[in-house]
Amino acid sequence: MVRIPRLGAAVPDAGTVAVIPSGAHPVARALEVSSWSKSTMPFTQRQGIPHHRFALTVPFPTSLEAEITCGSLAPDAEPHQGLLGKKLKVSGSMLEAHWISGDSCLLRISIMNFLDQLSLVVNTIQRFGPPVSR
């Protein structure tokens, strides 16, 4: 399921997406599914420049699979951190990804790379079977 908010609209997350300075923080533990696990949102909002936003929600059979996928995708920092921001979050068994950029080309490239990596992670999980809780 893909949800694309209109330009200038708030991306859902109990309010608007906060554009925060970059700073790697540890991936949230599997039980802390309500917190953002990775943020590369250093993109500074400048007056008069349109911002392109994209939100993607990916359903998984279990919250553990969503957490594993988020943990696998979160370490990949965006190469153009000053021009593009990306956040990943797990809510229950849903993986949420949010992007913001002033450059639609960079946004498209980031989304396509994310989808390629997501496909690889999902195929790996399917190949080795569902994860076992410890």
Image (cartoon, rainbow, N blue to C red):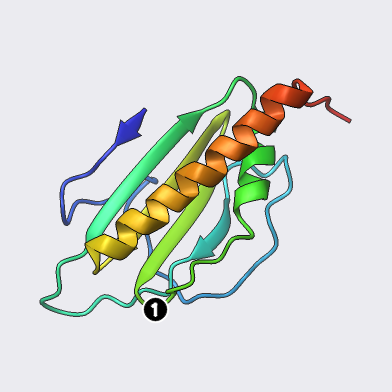
Q: Percent from the top left, x then y, of residue 134?
A: 89, 30
User: Could you tell me which residue is drawn at 44 percent across and 74 percent down?
Assistant: 81
Tell me the residue that label 1 is attached to: 82
Asked which quadrant contains residue 62, the reply is: top right
Asked which quadrant contains residue 42, the reply is: bottom left
Assess disc 1: are there few (<14), some (14-19) or many (≥20) residues with their C-alpha within 10 Å of its C-alpha. some
In the image shown, does 58 or 116 lie closer to the viewer? 116
Looking at the image, residue 59 lies above or below residue 89 = above
- In this rendering, would 80 be left or right of 89? left
User: Could you tell me which residue is drawn at 17 percent across and 57 percent down?
Assistant: 8
Asked which quadrant contains residue 5, the reply is: top left
Looking at the image, residue 16 lies above or below residue 60 = below
Looking at the image, residue 123 lies above or below residue 114 = above
Residue extending furthest toward the left: 48
Q: What kind of element bears circle 1? A: loop
Residue extending furthest toward the right: 134
- In this rendering, would 42 be left or right of 130? left
Q: Percent from the top left, x then y, of residue 71?
A: 67, 48
- In this rendering, would 99 be left or right of 9? right
Q: Percent from the top left, x then y, of residue 12?
A: 33, 44
Q: Percent from the top left, x then y, of residue 95?
A: 52, 38
Identified by mark 1, the residue type is Gly
Looking at the image, residue 35 lies above or below residue 130 = below
